[in-house]
Amino acid sequence: MTDVTSLWSYLATTPLIWLTITILAYLVADGVARRLGNPPWANPVLLSVLLIAPVLWLTRTDYSTYFEGAQFIHFLLGPATVALALPLWDNRDTIRTSVAPIMLALVVGSIVAAGSAILLARAFGLPMEVLLSLAPKSTTAPVALGISEAIGGIPALTAVLVIMTGIIGAVAVTPLMNLLRITDWRARGFAVGVAAHGIGTARAFQVNPVAGAYAGIAMALNALLTSLIVPLLVRWLV
Amino acid sequence: MLQTLGLLLGCQLLGEMTVRGFGLAMPGPVLGLTLLVLILTRMPILAERLRPTSTVILANLSFLFVPAGVGVIGNLEALSGDGIALLVILILSTVLSMLATVGTFIGVRHVTERWTT
């Protein structure tokens, strides 16, 4: 028994175990999702989280310990964002011919994403700092946290809301677009990129490469626009 | 693979340095993405060398969000008593935003296509 305890106390101090568990959980989640034909509800991020959370709970591991291992994966989000340049480059000809739809859809989508969140939070009578934390939820996490802090929100709450938004968008986009009978992959991808940043973009790449490229463009452009729009909307709508 | 990683990290680093240096309100990696597109316009041949590693990274983009996703579970108390209201708002607002975006995109595309043909 002491052997198990000393083995655990060794493992608990290295990043190895949580890195391995994260990869294994994802492989299981992604494998299940693929076998089912990638249905929208079997989101690999959501499934992985649901597999890892009980392990953390059972081993009484706090998030900062988990993140010591998982940070190596989290770090790759930066270079992965830069890598979106390649699908953008591959689709440069169709992008050049759709500059007008891209720009107008970006402005409208970005305003509705933040504006509807603000108005709904008011309708639900949520406290002001919760409303302010909610406003930048559709943009990528580093930008959303910066905006939240600047306008008087709670960055820790914004972090949770941004990830939840990403998962909701990734799960909702396919049934919603099919319901509306929208077959243009550019429009479908762009919509989920504006509304649900990187997690929505990951879903778009799962479904169609053109949708993925347009989701990537939408996410990048919305990162720029949201930081301009949210402070203005807060001034007008609050 | 290492060349690609070096180029991706190099673009990100230049992006982060520029953002911090000039106090810009955008993430460093997004500027790095823009920089890489500019490099590709100058050196289109690089695209094929980037492709194998970039394709692997982007095909597994969901994986990279797992640590942040686990953070949500660890931080659920941040939602305090407003969890249900926030969930309803997030669902409504995300669907509304997708509807507005896709409607505008397709509407404007129809107008511009009619205009140019």
Image (cartoon, helix red, strand yellow):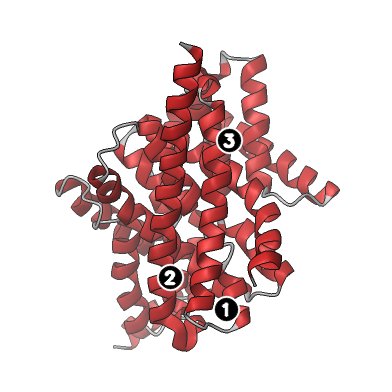
Amino acid type indicated by mark 2:
Ile
Seen in the picture, residue A107 relative to A235 is either above or below; the reply is above
**Crowd band around label 2 with a 10 angstrom C-alpha radius: few (<14), some (14–19), many (20+):** many
What is the quadrant of the N terminus of chain A in the image?
A: bottom left
A3 lies above or below B57: below
Q: Position of residue A118 (x, y in %)?
A: 56, 68
CA–CA distance between discs 1 and 2? 12 Å
Which is more toward the observer, A122 or B85?
A122
Q: Return the x and y of residue A164 as percentages of the image width and height.
A: 43, 65
Local crowd size for mark 1, using a 10 Å CA cut-off: few (<14), some (14–19), many (≥20)? many
- Tag 1 secondary structure: helix
Label total for image:
3
Marker disc for residue B89: 2
Relative to residue A25, is residue A212 depicted above or below? above
In the drawing, what numbered circle is on residue A103?
3
Task: Single out the mark in the foreground, 1 or 3.
Answer: 3
Gap in angstroms between the C-alphas marked 1 and 3: 30 Å
Q: Nearer the viewer, residue A196 or B36?
A: A196
Seen at 28% across and 62% down, the residue is: A47
Discs 3, 2: same chain: no
Residue depicted at x 30% and y 77%? A54
Give the mark, 1 or 3, whose residue is nearer the N terminus: 3
Q: Are marks 1 and 2 in contact (CB under 8 Å)?
A: no
Report how far apart the C-alphas of labels 3 and 2 lie in the structure. 26 Å
For label 2, the SS is helix
> Residue A79, can we see it?
no
Neighbour class for label 3 at 10 Å: few (<14), some, many (≥20)?
A: some
Horizontal side, residue A183 vs residue A166: left or right: left
Chain identifier of the residue bearing label 2 in the image = B
**Residue A42: percent from left, percent from top:** 24, 56
Q: Which residue is mark 1?
A: A130
